[in-house]
Amino acid sequence: MLADYSPVRIQARNSVVDAHRVDLVLIGARGKVGSAFRRQLGNRQPALLSEANLDLRLLAGFDRRGFAFDTHGIVPESIDEHMPERGADDVERLMSHVGRHGGVRTLVVDCTASDEIADFYPRLLMGGMGIVAANKRANARSLSSYRDLQHAARERGVPYRYETTVGSAIPLLGPLRDLRLRGERVISVQGVLSGSLSYILHRMHEGCLFSAAVAEARALGYTEPDPMEDLRAIDLSRKLLVLAREAGFAMELEDLVIEPFADLDIASDDLIPALQVADAGWKARIASALEQGERWVVLAEASREGGRINLRRVPAHSSFAQLEPGQNLISIRTELQDRMPLCVSGPGAGVEITAAGVLSDVVAAAAHWTRQD
């Protein structure tokens, strides 16, 4: 029973009488991004209260192993000590319980890569709760599902933010949305959108073996929990689909032509030994490109005609070839910015930077509500 879960109360709080309180429900609370988000939230809570008049309280934390809930707020750094084992049906029970938590504006912060959690988005939005998502799954489903989520958020007047789903903490989707709101028609988007593949290729150009580069990227938290989602360009296809839709392109997954980085059927547990069979081939491909003054990149591009993801050799002096390990670069062409496209660049992967992007979205979502007061 939810009533049986151990509460984790905040013992003291320097509060502002008229502070704008927003409660947070953190899904994936003890995952890599969720844990980093909790640390950053705990560090920033006092400053947000004193400088922005925002009282952000962690109402609940949830993951596959446990759950904690307290109406007074939970100390973010202490949550993992007070999350007892949960039952298999507790996702449904959590959402129902949060839905009955009235009187305080509530944000669900999804730091998972779970389809199961994404299934709840329509209910949460229609129930008057905002969502901040690092989870790409919901927006990368059918175009009608994507549009339904946007409509639900507008209809209920609640924030729905997902900046970190493309480009980690790079300010990309927001500025792209602003371009469209001011009347600019986007012609195309193109770029290096995968921080993990950017890192892997950069390390291989430095002489690292393919399998070792993948192992490094996974250890650094650059890849998805299953790195094959990166290598098969599954994760990248979701990013491109979200980016294309935000650019105003009515695109489905079937409209993308996808060339995987490595099209192998490998279980995650056996990944690195299995990838070693490709080390020699990749070493030769890298050497051939370097001899010709070129580098390999994975480019993603979309326009109203469709989208494409492919491996490409580009001149070593190209902007796409000059990126740092894990860096993203996105070029946006509009009718007004065609000859000199808008370029956005920054770190495209990493646990701490992604968590920082989630926190930025949380603050922006809370500010959305304060403007309504």
Image (spheres, rainbow, N blue to C red):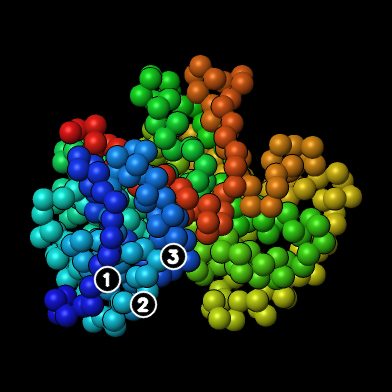
Marks 3, 2: nearer the viewer: 2
Question: Are the residues flagged by discs 1 and 3 in contact, CB closer than 8 Å?
Answer: no
Instruction: Name the image quarter holding residue 293.
Output: top right
Instruction: Please state which of residues 202 and 63 is positioned toward the viewer in this rendering.
Output: 63
Q: On the image, numbered disc 1 is attached to which residue?
A: 8
Q: Residue at x 64, y 52 (%)?
A: 326
Secondary structure of the residue carrying numbered label 1: loop
Instruction: Name the image quarter holding residue 7.
Output: bottom left
Secondary structure of the residue carrying numbered label 3: helix
First-in-chain label (3 vs 2): 3
Q: In the displayed structure, does residue 263 sit left or right of residue 290? A: left
Q: Is residue 289 above or below residue 32?
A: above
User: Disc 3 marks which amino acid?
Assistant: Ser
Residue 206: % across, % down: 81, 57
Residue 263 appears in view: no
Secondary structure of the residue carrying numbered label 2: helix
Characterize the local packing of mark 3: few (<14), some (14-19) or many (20 or more) Cα atoms within 10 angstroms.
many
Q: On the image, numbered disc 2 is attached to which residue?
A: 81
Instruction: Please state which of residues 337 and 47 is positioned toward the viewer in this rendering.
Output: 47
Residue 289: % across, % down: 82, 51
Q: Residue at x 80, y 42 (%)?
A: 316
Marks 1, 3: nearer the viewer: 1
User: Disc 1 marks which amino acid?
Assistant: Val
Q: Residue at x 14, y 76 (%)?
A: 3
Q: Residue at x 34, y 70 (%)?
A: 79
Q: Image quadrant for the C terminus?
A: top left
Q: On the image, numbered disc 3 is attached to which residue?
A: 35
Q: Is residue 365 above or below residue 31?
A: above
Calculate the distance from the C-alpha at mark 1 to the C-alpha at mark 3.
Answer: 16 Å
Q: In the displayed structure, does residue 141 sit left or right of residue 312? A: left
Outermost residue to the right = 291
